[in-house]
């Protein structure tokens, strides 16, 4: 729950995103310019994001004993969803480390030449690392719909009556399906427009983040379907 809240903070206040000097994420040079202009803030937001991903991974592990006890197909789906979720967040942790380094290179560029390295070398190095980080993030975009779909299916089976927690689980299923369709379209129909595909992807991520927050709240409150002690 805390991890999800922190990842929202890191995303919203990251320079180039929603609130601060919004930039086109597909224009890597523009993004680098924005990050360089607010390098200290960008470093802190990246660090907060990294910590939040670790916290989310630890939090979702709390569901694994329940998934093993659940048994059947739904239990297997939940186990797989937990494992794939940790894998996708691990990919983002790596991408966050790469962003840290690209911002560091931008900061070094502000200090001028260093030995045989020129300001241009630092700037081009930062751009190269950022571009590679975007490629790594593509792995996350491929895994997150699958992880969300599996988690949603496994969690939905744990609830009998429709309440806010089951609703969140159903939304995870729908969001996972939407993410799969969006990723397939991105691979096979590049003329659709990358901006639109990124908008759909980011919208799904925010909605699914809220769903994860709700599930985390249920775990914290010891809801019977989400607590090993109450189960």
Image (spheres, grey):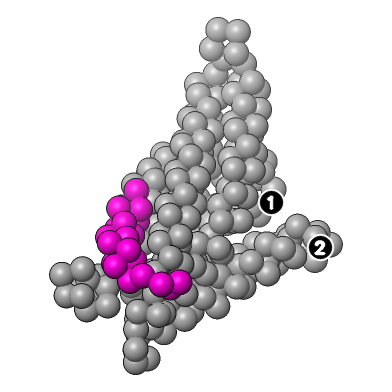
* Magenta highlight: main SS: helix
Which image quarter holds the C terminus? Answer: bottom left
Residue 202 spot, x, y in % from top left: 56, 64
- Secondary element under disc 1, as helix, strand or loop, is loop
Image-based side of 157 in relation to 133, left or right: left
Looking at the image, can residue 230 be seen? yes
> Against 101, is 230 above or below?
below
- Give the camera-side residue of 25 and 204: 204
For image coordinates 55% across by 73% down, the residue present is: 175
Task: Give the residue at the far top of this rendering.
Answer: 115
Magenta-highlighted residues: 54-74
Residue bearing the label numbered 2: 189
Task: Give the residue at the far bottom of this rendering.
Answer: 161
- Give the camera-side residue of 2 and 103: 2
As for residue 227 lying within the magenta part, the answer is no
Front: mark 1 or 2: 2
Question: Are the two marked residues, 1 and 2, in contact with CB atoms closer than 8 angstroms?
Answer: no
For image coordinates 36% across by 70% down, the residue present is: 71
**Residues at marks 1 and 2, CA–CA distance in whole angstroms:** 17 Å
Which image quarter holds the N terminus? Answer: bottom left
- Secondary element under disc 2, as helix, strand or loop, is loop
Residue 70 spot, x, y in % from top left: 33, 71
Residue bearing the label numbered 1: 26
Looking at the image, can residue 41 be seen? no
As for residue 64 lying within the magenta part, the answer is yes
């Amino acid at each position: 729950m805390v991890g999800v809240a922190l990842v929202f903070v890191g995303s919203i206040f990251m320079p180039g995103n929603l609130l601060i000097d919004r930039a086109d994420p597909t224009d890597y040079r523009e993004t680098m310019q924005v990050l360089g202009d607010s390098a200290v803030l960008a470093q802190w937001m990246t660090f907060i994001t990294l910590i939040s991903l670790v916290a989310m991974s630890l939090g979702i592990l709390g569901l694994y004993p329940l998934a093993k006890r659940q048994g059947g197909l739904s239990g297997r789906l939940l186990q797989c969803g937990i494992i794939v979720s940790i894998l996708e967040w691990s990919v983002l942790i790596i991408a966050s480390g790469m962003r840290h380094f690209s911002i560091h290179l931008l900061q070094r560029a502000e200090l001028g030449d260093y030995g045989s390295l020129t300001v241009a070398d630092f700037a081009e190095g930062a751009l190269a690392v950022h571009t590679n980080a975007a490629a790594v993030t593509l792995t996350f975009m491929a895994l997150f719909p699958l992880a969300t779909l599996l988690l949603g299916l496994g969690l939905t089976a744990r609830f009998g009556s429709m309440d806010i927690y089951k609703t969140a689980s159903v939304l995870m299923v729908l969001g996972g399906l939407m993410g799969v369709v969006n990723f397939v379209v991105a691979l096979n129909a590049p003329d659709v427009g990358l901006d639109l595909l990124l908008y759909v992807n980011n919208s799904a991520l925010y909605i699914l983040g809220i769903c994860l927050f709700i599930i985390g709240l249920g775990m914290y409150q010891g809801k019977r379907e989400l607590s090993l002690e109450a189960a």
